[in-house]
Amino acid sequence: MTVGKSEKPSDNPASETSATASSHESEANENPEGDQTLEAFSRKDGLPTDEHDSAGSDAETGSAVDSGEEDEADEWEALRAENARLRDESLRAYADAENARKRAQTEISNARRFALEGFASELLNVRDSLDLAKSVDLDGAEGVVERVVEGLELTLKQLDSAFEQFSVFEISPEVGDKLDPESHQAMTLAPSSDVAPNHICQVIQKGYRLHDRLLRPARVIVAKAPEGED
């Protein structure tokens, strides 16, 4: 009767390691679905599964950064162009306003200097008529005085026409009119029994106004009650 030898654990660790690796390799070959599951899990979590996936992710990131820098540069360039346009418009507006201000100052200055140009030109005719009246020989033929008076009347008409054209109106009060402090200037008081007190009894000089502005008041003498009367 033959008795078998009892099995003892192997004293060679290398052989055990080799056997274990062979066992795992055979299990991997027998279960290919495990590798596919691991790869799918890595892709789901956004992890690169191999070198190609890692390189693709880096390329996409670099492209996004470059695109962002280009957009920012374009935005800055647009802002610079807009700033230059607004600055040019503001300078043009300032120049136009300055030119308008200078033109207005020139026009105001000319208006002050030549405001009486039209009125002065109308007075030239009056001056010519007075020169003609002055040159008349009073020792000449008969009727000289009548012609001089007629010439003076014509000259006064020319002067009144010039006054009317430029809205210069005469203030000519009548005897018996009530004193108006707005347009009359009382030079003195005179006792009068014919004119009521505080009324005009004599006109010394006519007055004039330009439109509604008083140029010169009419100078008058105002009546007062005679002495001994209330």
Image (tube, rainbow, N blue to C red):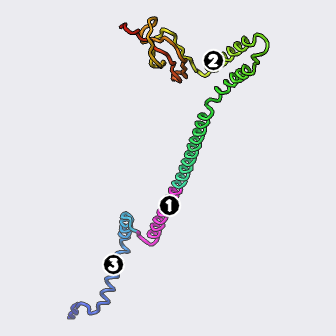
User: Over which residues does the magenta segment extend?
Assistant: 48-77
Q: Residues within 10 Å of mark 2 (few under 14, many from 20)?
A: some
For label 1, the residue is 67
Q: Position of residue 218 (x, y in %)?
A: 51, 18
Q: Quadrant of the C terminus?
A: top left
For label 3, the residue is 24
Query: What amino acid type is highlighted by mark number 3?
Result: His
Say which label, 1 or 3, has the lower sequence index: 3
Q: Residue at x 41, y 10 (%)?
A: 197
Between the residue at mark 2 and the residue at mark 1, the CA separation in whole angstroms equals 88 Å
- Residue at the top extreme? 194
| Figure quadrant of residue 157 | top right
Up/down of 223 relative to 80, above or below:
above
On the picture, is 104 further left or further right than 142? left
For label 2, the residue is 160
Q: Residue at x 36, y 78 (%)?
A: 25
